[in-house]
Amino acid sequence: MSRKTKLKIIPLGGLEEIGKNMTVFEYGNDIIIIDCGLAFPDDDMLGVDLVIPDISYLLKNKDKIRAIVLTHGHEDHIGALPYVLTQINVPIYGTKLTLGLVETKLKEHGLLSVVERNIVQPGQEVKIGAFKVEFVRSTHSIADAVALAIHTPVGIVVHTGDFKIDYTPIEG
């Protein structure tokens, strides 16, 4: 890739709203998706059970998608996975607890045997296309949460996921 190749960061959900967390990182011919969440309907959305991000951009660029990387196991970060994976089946990466919660969803939707799942540890780095994703331990209201340091050809982007400041950490 030339230095003129741009890094695109495209939020498909989760900004200025609660839920539907999904951010696309695109560089050249490689896309990684960070989180794949849902939202619950507003009171005026009668007959709607769940709200998922608009993935039409992803469907148009399906051949570029290398993986879905998860920051933690809350519904607003993993809830849309079964619906997205039926249309875009790519490997998913997450910590042990996060993927444990995901596996329950995949089993319920008949996808457990067809989706590649990769367990990662905080501190681990994984090369995915043009990206190297570093998993950084993070404190949140659910265990096994991580932030991400996404190394790209044009620099490093830190994606925090959700976090809480722990003023009395057990491990210092």
Image: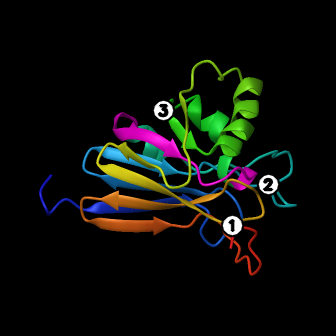
Point 63% across, 39% down: residue: 81
Disc sitting over residue 90 in the figure: 3
Disc sitting over residue 139 in the figure: 1
Point 70% across, 51% down: residue: 38
Q: CA distance from mark 2 to mark 1?
A: 24 Å
38 in relation to 108, above or below? below
Q: Is residue 103 left or right of residue 54?
A: right
Front in this rendered view, residue 148 or 91: 148
For mark 2, give the secondary structure.
Answer: loop
Q: Which residues are magenta?
A: 62-76
Do tag 2 and tag 3 residues touch (Cβ < 8 Å)?
no
Discs 2/3, front: 3
Amino acid type indicated by mark 2: Phe
Q: CA distance from mark 2 to mark 3?
A: 25 Å
Q: Earlier in the sequence, mark 1 or mark 3?
A: 3
Tell me, yes or no, whether the highlighted magenta stretch contains residue 157. no
Amino acid type indicated by mark 1: Thr
Color encoding of the figure:
rainbow
For mark 3, give the secondary structure.
Answer: loop
82 in relation to 128, above or below? above
Residue 124 screen position, x and y as percent? 47, 50
Amino acid type indicated by mark 3: Val
Q: Residues within 10 Å of mark 1 (few under 14, many from 20)?
A: some
| Numbered-mark total | 3
Q: Quadrant of residue 161?
A: bottom right
Q: Residues within 10 Å of mark 3 (few under 14, many from 20)?
A: many
Q: Which residue is mark 2?
A: 40
Point 65% across, 23% down: residue: 111
Disc sitting over residue 170 in the figure: none
